[in-house]
Image: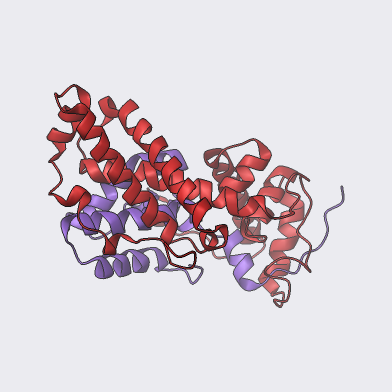
Amino acid sequence: MSPRSRRLSSRAAGRLTLDAEPYLSCDDCFEQVDVQVDALVSGVSESLPPAFRAHLVGCAACRAEARTLLDLAAHEVGADRDTLLAHFDRELAAGTDLL
Amino acid sequence: MDETEAPTIVSRLPPAGGIAPPVTDDWVARLGSGRDRDQAIAELHGLMLRAARHQIATMSEAHELGWTRREEIVHAAADEATSAVLSRLSRFEGRSRFTTWAYKFAILQTAVEVRRSAWRRRETDLTALGEPASPTTGPEAHAEASDLGRAVDEAMNSVLTDHQRHVAVALLIDGVPIDVLAERLGSNRNALYKTLHDARVRLRNDLTTRGYLGARAPEEATP
């Protein structure tokens, strides 16, 4: 099969060349998502570990599910959900205009 | 519930079961071999229902499924998640709240099934490995190609394998959800994300060599 030419926008090119290092697998992301979410909710941590953050930036499915978990966990303890979700979004958006 | 009504979101719900949730140790003990294990399982199922409803409410693609199908997904996901939690109870290490740990199973089950259900209606051939997306059908169809875009296109054809190119095009250009692509290819999310990650690394290396991307700072490369 001979590859064909595509018309890629800047955003598409950005998604394809996204720097998602350090590598973290979806399984490892799932393993730790509850711990990272609770750390944000409880205020133990204000930032995400680099590999976990990089994975959420690079994987739309894990990102969406982590966001839901953060919302639920925040509700569970009566935390300010809007503030936490906005912080979460800013954390992931830092350094990229693709999200 | 009216067909047009949005699924219940968590902010409209009372706390689980209408009472304060048990602390972590209580959950594990009660679900393990406590005298009220059946009651604890019922409460856990209620939590899973809540998480499933919340997840489905956040997904725009769920709206087109209709209320009946959404309810089917919610209940099936809650059932699956309850089983998943019970079967993994001995692996819960208490590093998070029990409820946070348990919620993630229902969220995953729900999200995967919504994505798959929404895409079952679409006539999309996702099996032709290496076939580039048609420039007239994808969401980027009318976007103007950029210099970087042309360079990335060249790199996709020169440094990616057919499988890497197919996965990258499907996920990042055609917008196919990763769980849908995994189902069609007989793969899984983990494997496809690894393929996508490796493709990105190859593209970045090629584009860096050709001067389209800046080199990574050494400190950025340290986990």
Q: Spot the residue most to the front.
A: B1
Res A93 quadrant in image: bottom left
Query: What's the residue at 75%, 60% (across, down)?
Result: B154
Q: Spot the residue most to the top.
A: B33
The residue nearer to you, when weighing B139 against A46, is B139
Query: What's the residue at 36%, 53% (across, down)?
Result: A50
Instruction: Indicate whether A75 appears above or below A24.
Output: below
Residue A67 screen position, x and y as percent: 36, 58
Res B64 quadrant in image: bottom right
Res A80 quadrant in image: bottom left
Q: Colour of chain B?
A: red
Q: Colour of chain A?
A: purple
Is residue B212 something that shows in the picture? no
Residue B160 screen position, x and y as percent: 71, 48
Residue B180 screen position, x and y as percent: 61, 47
Residue B179 left/right relative to B124: left
Instruction: Indicate whether B210 appears above or below B17.
Output: below
Is residue A39 something that shows in the picture? yes
Residue B112 screen position, x and y as percent: 51, 46
Instruction: Indicate whether A60 appears above or below B38.
Output: below
Instruction: Indicate whether B43 appears above or below B16.
Output: above
Query: What's the residue at 31%, 29% (across, down)?
Result: B86
Residue B17 left/right relative to A86: left
